[in-house]
Amino acid sequence: MDIDKRMELVKRNTQEIITESELKELLKKKKNPSVYLGTAITGRPHVGYFVWVLKLADFLKAGFKVKLLLADMHGALDNTPWDTLEKRYNYYSRLIPLMFESIDVDIKNFEIVKGSDFQLKKDYMFDVLKVSTFASINDCKRAASEVVKFGDNPKLSGLIYPIMQMLDEQYLDVDIQYGGIDQRKILMFARENHIKVGYKPRIEIMTPLIPGLVGKKMSSSDPKSKIDLLDAEEEVLNKIKNADCVSGDIDNGLLAFLKHVVMIIKKDRNEEFIVERDKKYGGDLSYKEYKDIENDFKNRKLHPLDLKNAVAREISLLLKPMKKHRESLLKLVKEAY
């Protein structure tokens, strides 16, 4: 695969890359560069996680070595009970590979890394303390403000969070850190501060956040806003039917999920998105491009209920691998949450 095609894969579905020129230079120099995404093991994974699973799949297809950091220590710093960390790690590490199975991606160059396996070592902790001597309280609080739940009485742990995330890039030995756009301030904190401890700044790549089914953000803490990966088919349909989806208004979580997840998968499989309708309403609709779905919905040619039913079917298909292991996964969930 040539550099242009690799660039196209890496850039797909992204909101910001810092910087594209550095990315192109990296692809010229390295056949198999490395990238990581870190996720704190806090709330239960939901369908919004497919955004970053698909992006990691793009990196794999573009020849990258991909690391997923299951950040148990970051979870603790963001108020996850210490006695649940191992149990939540077990749940995440079992569930995430099933998400890759769901989208038919080869994961031979994919690795799951447990944060505490390297973050508690002497050299790493020395660097945490070293960075804390020049990074101000305001710097750290500003960096973590979109990610850490500070509350009315902020804990010191929230200020350590961005320092550790910055150092993860170095200790995981990667060329790129990838995250959601809500991570931007932490990623910029990393680029600004690595040089102060003699490390090279990394390329930072961000994808957009998907709105929730109800409200503006798909959140693990709000069951109504998201579909859990272990939801049964009837639960999926019920949540989708109750989702915010006003006729003609394209600002909703269903269309965002279609754009950033479903239609990406359809394109890769050379499939169409089918909306099943009764013949008296014009029969089925089929779409190859997301923009056509959006235009039809905006112009009220696509009814919200028909859209909801079609999205619910697609989500249920994505959840098939999880359904096969649902009982054992539910046991892990019961222990972890």
Image (spheres, grey):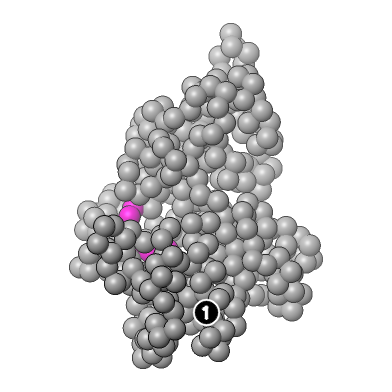
Point out the residue furthest to the top here. Answer: 280
Above or below — where is 327 with respect to 97? above
Give the residues in magenta. Answer: 39-44
Q: Foreground residue, 232 or 34?
A: 34
What secondary structure prevails in the magenta region? loop
Where in the figure is residue 50, as x and y percent of width and height? 50, 51
Identify the residue position indicated by label 1 in the image.
193
Where in the figure is residue 321, as x and y percent of width and height? 43, 49
Above or below — where is 79 with respect to 330? below
Q: Quadrant of the N terminus?
A: bottom right
Q: Tell me if residue 121 can be seen.
A: yes
In which image quadrant can residue 323 be found? top left
Q: Quadrant of the C terminus?
A: bottom left
Q: Foreground residue, 198 or 90?
A: 198
Crowd class of label 1 (few under 14; some 14 to 19; many from 20; radius 10 Å): some
Above or below — where is 240 with respect to 322? above
Where in the figure is residue 163, as x and y percent of width and height? 42, 76
Q: Foreground residue, 38 or 180?
A: 180
Q: Is 314 colored magenta in this rendering? A: no
Q: Residue at x 48, y 27 (%)?
A: 245
Identified by mark 1, the residue type is: Asn
| Secondary structure category for the residue under label 1 | helix
Q: Residue at x 48, y 82 (%)?
A: 171
Instruction: Indicate left or right for 314 with 334 as reference.
Output: right
Q: Tell me if residue 320 can be seen.
A: no
Where in the figure is residue 187, as x and y percent of width and height? 52, 68
Above or below — where is 206 with respect to 35? above
Q: Is 42 colored magenta in this rendering? A: yes
